[in-house]
Amino acid sequence: MGYLLGVDVGNTKTLYALANEDGAVINVHYGKPANFQSLGLAKSQERIKDGINETLSPLGIPPYDVGFVYYGVAGADRPKDFELIRKMLNGIEMNKFEFHNDGWIALKSGTIDGIGMVITCGTGNTNFACNSQREWKRIGGLDIL
């Protein structure tokens, strides 16, 4: 499967964490902001590509050795946002990827089973909660639920 890459695409910074097949984090890179709403899709894509290269190149790892990338994207709020972001991320040409709002990845990464609540107070404010029936709610951001 190769390496795994997590990318938290934000409005004040973009954080990259590269892990090996065992899940051990082997490199972390703090990159420039890459929010598509602030920069536009083309500049956001360029910054994410640059950040990926800056994460992989010190270790001599080519992008095709990364088996999966998960992006948490600030501003992934509405169906139209998801459509635009997917198109943008497809242009980065990594093997396999998936993405969601950056608040959702905070909830998933902070719990074993995804059940819980996360309250964010950063550049923006989007809060998520998921119960044991896997029903999730969101408050904040551009919520349409």
Image: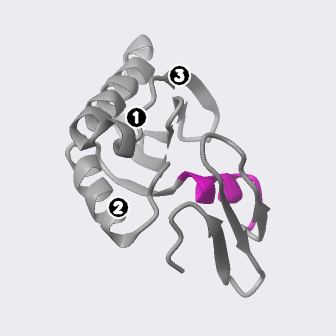
What number is the disc on residue 81?
A: 2
Q: Secondary structure at mark 3?
A: strand
Q: Identify the mark nearer the N-term, 1 or 3.
A: 3
Work out whether 86 lies above or below 18: below
Query: Residue beneath label 3, please?
Result: 29
How packed is label 1: few (under 14 Cα within 10 Å), some, or many (20 or more)? many
Q: Nearer the viewer, mark 3 or mark 2?
A: 2
Range covered by the magenta-colored residues: 102-113
Residue 95 inside the magenta-drawn segment: no
Q: Position of residue 95 (x, y in %)?
A: 29, 47
Residue 56 falls left or right of residue 94: right
- At x 39% / y 25%, what residue is drawn? 51
CA gap, disc 2 and disc 1 = 15 Å
Q: Identify the mark nearer the N-term, 2 or 1.
A: 1
Q: Secondary structure at mark 2?
A: helix
Q: Quick one: 100 or 62, which is closer to the camera?
A: 100
Query: Residue beneath label 1, please?
Result: 34
CA gap, disc 1 and disc 3 = 14 Å
Work out whether 113 lies above or below 17: below
Q: Quick one: 115 or 144, which is closer to the camera?
A: 144
- At x 35% / y 33%, what residue is drawn? 48
Residue 112 inside the magenta-drawn segment: yes
Q: Amino acid at mark 2?
A: Asp
- At x 76% / y 80%, what residue is drawn? 131
Q: Amino acid at mark 3?
A: His
- Quarter of the image for residue 115 reads bottom right
Work out whether 103 lies above or below 23: below
